[in-house]
Image (cartoon, rainbow, N blue to C red):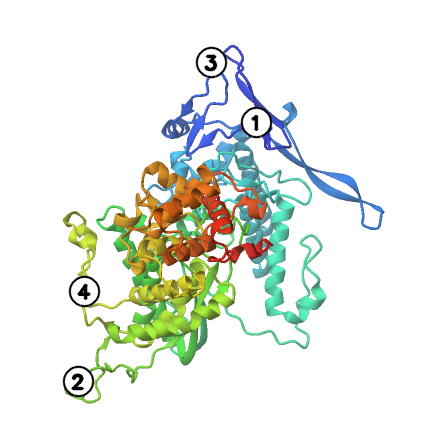
Amino acid sequence: GARLLPDVAQGPGSDGRVCRFEIVKSVKQQSAGTIAGGDGLCPFPDCGRVIDGDVIKAEAQAGRMGEQLYAIVFKRRVLARTRTGGMREKWVRGYRAPRPEDDVAALVAERLAGKLSEWEALDLVPNERFPEGTNDDRPLQYGMQLWRDLFSPRQLLGHGTSVEVFRELLEEEQRKGTLTESTKAAFSYLALSLDKLRDYNSRMTRWHVNREVMVNTFDRHDFSFKWSYAEMAPLIAGLGYDWAIGQTAKCIGELVDLTRPDLAANRGGIDARQGGLALSAGSFTPPAIAITCKSADSLDHLADASVDAVVMDPPYYANVMYAELSDFFYVWLKRTAGHVCPDWFRRPLTDKESEAVANVAKFKDHKGARKLAERDYQDRMAAIFAECRRVLKPGGIMTVMFTHKETSAWDALTKAMMEAGFVITASWPVNTEAEGSLHIKGKAAANSTIFLVCRPRALTPPLSRVREREGPAEREGEGQAETVFWEDIEPRVARAVRRRVAEFEAAGIKGVDLYLASFGPALEEFSRHWPLQRGTPRPLPEAKKRRKQQELFEEDYDPYAATPEDALEAARREVKQWRLEQLTHRKASAELDPLTAWFVLAWDAFNAPEAPYDEALRLARVCGVDLDGDVVRTLADKKASAIVLWDSARRAAKGSLGAADGSRAMIDAIHHAAHAVRQRTVAAGRELLEKAGVHDHPRFLLALEAVLEVLPVSKAFTGIDEPTGPVSDSASDFEALEMLRRLAFQDQVDQPTQLDFWGNDKT
């Protein structure tokens, strides 16, 4: 870590007030952070005031935000002993504070000033403004008006020089005559390599303190501002440009392996500095490959019914604004690759109008922007799926990969799919995201991607499209397809989910991923009978009832419409019931009250104290709970678009605990007991429950068992330090309740199975 050493000089406002830095080896020695929630804390001991975030942004926009080098990362060779007792050299990283010779800011500024006018005249560096009205305008908020402002002066000097050299090399080749296709490809790959280096060398790159590596600009898929950014030294041998070009060469080699498996065994890897590949076919016949770059809703180069399979990883609704982020690369690529393939870089910036995402910023001047963005995404995906339906052979198959916690995203995607004429015939959850620490429960993140297997729907209506409870007299005519009602199909959806949920859980799928995995079989069954209608009208949404929000519903509201969201809610109900049975070990002598069930399932599903409000709302519906009326300000807080669960101490401080006898909800008795143990003793917790008369109540024992299965396990059992915050607070509840169980309830309540993972003996 780093320790700040402020030099106060002659006091506030005097010359020479600077911060120096010292590298320290323990957490206790390092200085506290100087940024919290966007606000700054002055590090000088004779000041110490808080600087409002808006003031910082105003200063940045006025060009008065500076930067200072505070640490140097280096490598050195050391001798290390081997397992056999010998000695060998190895490289290790080290850290040191900056020295005077490291501060080359003045020299860089001088060099950049001498180059910038020429570069602007030759169009070698981006002069485009960062666009207003995007989904993430933090660069503008912090004074980065132009795309080149996303780079420090030293970074910009390096990147501008690389474009200058690229142009010189290209012009040298062009003077020899028309560029060959191989030469064009080589320059295109070089342009991509330079862009890769920019991704790892901007004002938004950072140092990963645990892995001790650079983290790229878009590790979060946004333009998040980095208060302490990291930058490469690009000219060090084996790093910088060498690394970026080597990474591109590695990717080329992997692509070659896919198309020429006969060469893979002999290639042994590509070294970008030692020549190319021998691609003579010999006895091997390479497969025919055609690569095109077109909009997915206009595949006019493909004939009808000419494709066997479509594999698609579509845009994930509003998760990532790909075109907005791509401008970071595009403004540089058009100054390099754009001189090789000019037809691909005619636009000033990337095309955002045609992108198939739910882009709220595109409709910011319209009422109901979110609804319009959702509809735009659905319409664009429907056009894409319709084109896929056109080019697929009758027996063809389409596989779509999708993962999203928001039900509205699933609803829009699957509705578009079915409207285009597809039926979902199979689904498979696949773990595609690497998990972090097993004990860190800070984010309600999904780790699984759902693979939806789709086939073209038959043109004739399926035989199942007959309402089972209607008789012949009610049918409109012989041979006509009849209306299918959701009420008839809902039990089938529930059974389909129930058949698969145990299989998913046995495969290690848990938390929010278990709910997502269940969407697959639910949508399979639902899509077989599409389109459907409701026999009973859906209740009017609350927002529709409120006159002030009526303009949000631009489309006519159809209370009889059945949508994929109905199937997803049915799936969620089945998973809810399944998980409650697992968490309470299928004990049927009692059941959890709705509020306690919601608390247990929220922790079980989201694996974190914070969860998206919309998903918490949907979980509340299947539990029979009013989220705003029963949960908010009672069990949780609402923060923007999220719900943050409270622990017992927080509820006690807020005065939101109900009666200790659990008459409102048994989670009140649980939290009363946990708070008593944390504030006083385990015996005090037991005494409180006995006085309330719930210590032997079946519903209390059931609730205790379920809560202990979902709360985060504390350091007392894991040995792992947890940062102070909502997770550690809830872990303290776990520790208190487990100590109480061991003292008073070990005969009635089994040890939580999650302790088995940490090697705790049964007690």
Sequence-first disc among 4 and 1: 1
Q: Nearer the viewer, mark 2 or mark 1?
A: 2
Mark 4 touches mark 3? (CB < 8 Å): no
The kind of residue on which mark 2 rests is: Arg
Q: CA distance from mark 4 to mark 3?
A: 67 Å
Q: Which residue is mark 1?
A: 105
As drawn, the label of residue 475 is 2
What kind of element bears circle 2?
A: loop
The kind of residue on which mark 1 rests is: Ala
Tell me where residue 95 sits by quadrant.
top right
Q: CA distance from mark 2 to mark 4?
A: 23 Å
Q: Nearer the viewer, mark 4 or mark 3?
A: 4
Q: Which residue is mark 3?
A: 12
Sequence-first disc among 3 and 1: 3
Sequence-first disc among 2 and 4: 2
Q: Crowding near pointer 1: few (<14 within 10 Å), some, many (20+)?
A: some
What kind of element bears circle 4?
A: loop
